[in-house]
Amino acid sequence: MREVFRRIYGASPEGIWAAPGRVNLIGEHTDYNDGFALPIALTQNTLVAARKRQDGRLRLHSAQGDGPVIDLHVDRLTPGAVTTWGAYPAGVVWALREAGHRFGGADLHIDSTVPTGAGLSSSAALECAVAFAYNDLYGLGLSPSALALIGQRAENGFAGVPCGAMDQLASACCTAGAALHLDIRAGTHQQVPFDPGAQGMSLLVVDTRVKHDLGDGAYAALRAGCERAARLLGLTALRDLTPADLPRATRALPAHLVPLVRHVVTENARVTEAVSLLRAGHLAALGPILTDGHASLRDDFRISCAESDLVVSTALAHGALGARMTGGGFGGSVIVLAEEARVEVIGAAVIAAFPAAGYQAPYLFPVSPAEGARRIA
Ligand code: GLA
C-alpha cells in the first residue's frame, strides 16, 4: 500500500486506515424507518492510505478503479460533479465541509477486498475509511458514529443514494466477536456477543453474483412507500407501530402499502427477539428468525430474487438452521446459519444447485464478526 502510494504521489502516506464491509443478521429496511438492525462487520476491508495537502487539492486513486488519479479541490465539491466511485470519498469530504469542519486537501490511495455490488456495503466501507482518515489527519475529533453519519450524508447528498445509516454505523462501530444492536431513532448501539464458532455453528455468506444497485430507484421507491404509510397513519416513522397495531394500520392504509408496513413492523420485532435470544446464549434459535425474515422480504417487501430464494431453499433442505437474503435486496448476498458439521454439505448443495438452474457460480465464504473502522498504520 505504501509503495503504491509513493509511486502515485511521490511521497509516503501519513497513515493507513481500514473500514470493513458488513452483513446484517436481521433488521432489513428498518433503518430509514427509525427502527432496529443487527449487523456484523466482515474481515474484508477497504484501506485508505492518506497524506495531507496544503493546497486544498483532493486527489483520489483506487487500485480497483485502475483509472487515472481523480483531481478535485475541497472547496469546489458539488453534488453531481463526480459520478464514478470517486463520488463516495469526495462525498465524505463534502459532507464534512457541510457539517462546518475546516481542513485542507489530501492525497488518497484506496484498495479494497470488500466485494462490490454484493450487498456487503462496499460503499459504506469506502466512506468510513475516508472519514476516519480525514478525522485523524486533520484532528476533527469526531466519534465513530458521527463519522458514520457523515458517510451516510455523503451517500445521500453527494452520491444520490437515499440509504439509511445501518451500513455506515456497522462499518464504523462494530467490534470483533459481537453483533451491533442499532436503535436508529435513539441514535444508540450496543454490542451483543455473537460467536457461532464457539457454539459449534458457522455463518456462511453466499454472494449470488446478482449485482445489486441501490441507485436504480427501486430502493428509493420502497423508502418513499414506507414514509408515505407513516404519514397516512399520522406517525413520525413506522418504528412507532408494534405487531399489535397491524390490524388497525391495515384497515387505515391503501392495500399496496400494507405489505411494506407488515414487513417493517415484524422485522423490528424479529431484531428485538434475536437480541434477547443471543443475550440468553440461544444462538441456534436465531435460525427460524432469519428464515422468517427472508419470507417477509420475499413476499411482503418483494425484494428477493430467484437466485437468493434458491440459496435459502437449498440450504434449508440440507439442514441449515436458518437463511435469508441480507442487505438492500434485488440480488446481492444470502447468509446461512448452520451447525459446523452441516456446512460442507450445504455449501456443496448450493454450489451444485446454481449451474443446475442455469445461474452463474455463487461465491461462498464463512464469516465471523470482525472489528470496525480503525487506523492500522
Ligand atoms: C442498504 C442500505 C441500508 C439499509 C439496507 C436494508 O444496505 O444502504 O441503509 O436500508 O439496504 O436494510
Image: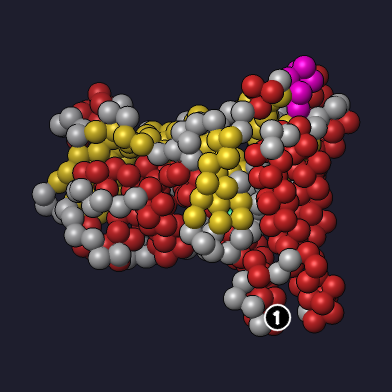
Q: What scheme was used to colour the molecule?
A: secondary structure
User: Mark 1 = which residue?
Assistant: 233
Q: Is residue 93 visible?
A: yes
User: Which quarter of the figure is the N terminus placed in?
Assistant: top left
Percent from the top left, x then y, of residue 96? 30, 59
Q: Main secondary structure of the magenta part?
A: helix
Q: Amino acid at mark 1?
A: Leu
Side of 372 relative to 4 (left or right): right
Callout count: 1
* Residue 343 higher or lower than 244, as above or below: above
Residue drawn at (74%, 39%), measured in percent from left and top?
Answer: 286
Please name whichever residue, 117 or 136, is drawn nearer the observer in this view of the structure: 136
Which residue is most to the right?
Answer: 317
- The residue segment tinted magenta is 338-344
**Does the magenta portion include 361?**
no
Which residue is most to the left?
Answer: 54
Q: Is residue 88 visible?
A: no
